[in-house]
Image (spheres, rainbow, N blue to C red):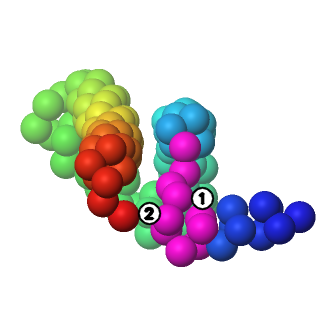
Amino acid sequence: MQVIVDSVADFFAFRIFVSLDVLRVAYALGAIGMPLVAWGVWLWLDRFTLWKWMRGAAADATRQVIPGRWRLVAILLFVLCFLCMELMWRMMFEFIIAYLQMRDALQWLAHSAGMP
């Protein structure tokens, strides 16, 4: 029981960090969950009249500039935003994992040199 209490205390005191496996699971959940949440927000916003009016006004304006292609432009913009979002999510986790690996290597060097 004392080992569990000490481990939890070390975790909250930042003497130990989350493992790379936990980060990989969090990354996968976010990579799958972000598009689902974005779709849910879109459906939630779609209920409001102002949002429908804004979307309709944008569609009318786009139809005047590019006749018949406004839906394709909207889909391409959505795909571009989705890819950028996923890329940034991936880069954030790569930086976190690299930081943890550098920290582990520096701790090993400090320990092998006899530093506390």
Secondary element at image label 1: helix
Q: Residue 2 has which mark? A: none
Image quarter (top left, top right, bottom left or bottom right) of the N terminus? bottom right
Can residue 33 be seen from the camera position used here? no
- Which residue is rendered at x = 78% and y = 61% of the image? 3
Image quarter (top left, top right, bottom left or bottom right) of the C terminus? bottom left
Query: Which residue lies under the disc numbered 1?
Result: 44
In screen coordinates, is 84 left or right of 36?
left
Instruction: Place residue 73 in its image quadrant.
Output: top left
- Which residue is rendered at x = 36% and y = 50% of the image? 111
Question: Residue 59, image x and y in percent?
Answer: 29, 45
Pointer 1 and pointer 2: residues touching (CB < 8 Å)?
Answer: no
Of residues 26 and 86, the one drawn nearer to the viewer in this rendering = 26
Under mark 2, the amino acid is Trp
Of residues 20 and 115, the one drawn nearer to the viewer in this rendering = 115
Question: Residue 31, image x and y in percent?
Answer: 49, 36
Secondary element at image label 2: helix
In screen coordinates, is 51 left or right of 105?
right
Can residue 58 be seen from the camera position used here? yes
Q: Residue furthest front?
A: 114
> Mark 1, mark 2: which one is toward the viewer?
1
Query: Which residue lies under the disc numbered 2?
Result: 51
Mark 2 nearby-residue class (10 Å; few <14, some 14–19, many ≥20) = few
Mark 1 nearby-residue class (10 Å; few <14, some 14–19, many ≥20) = few
Q: Residue furthest left?
A: 65
- Which residue is rendered at x = 49% and y = 68% of the image? 14
Instruction: Place residue 89 in its image quadrant.
Output: top left
Under mark 1, the amino acid is Trp
Instruction: Place residue 76 in its image quadrant.
Output: top left
Q: Residue furthest right?
A: 1
In screen coordinates, is 63 left or right of 45?
left
What segment carries the magenta color? 10-19
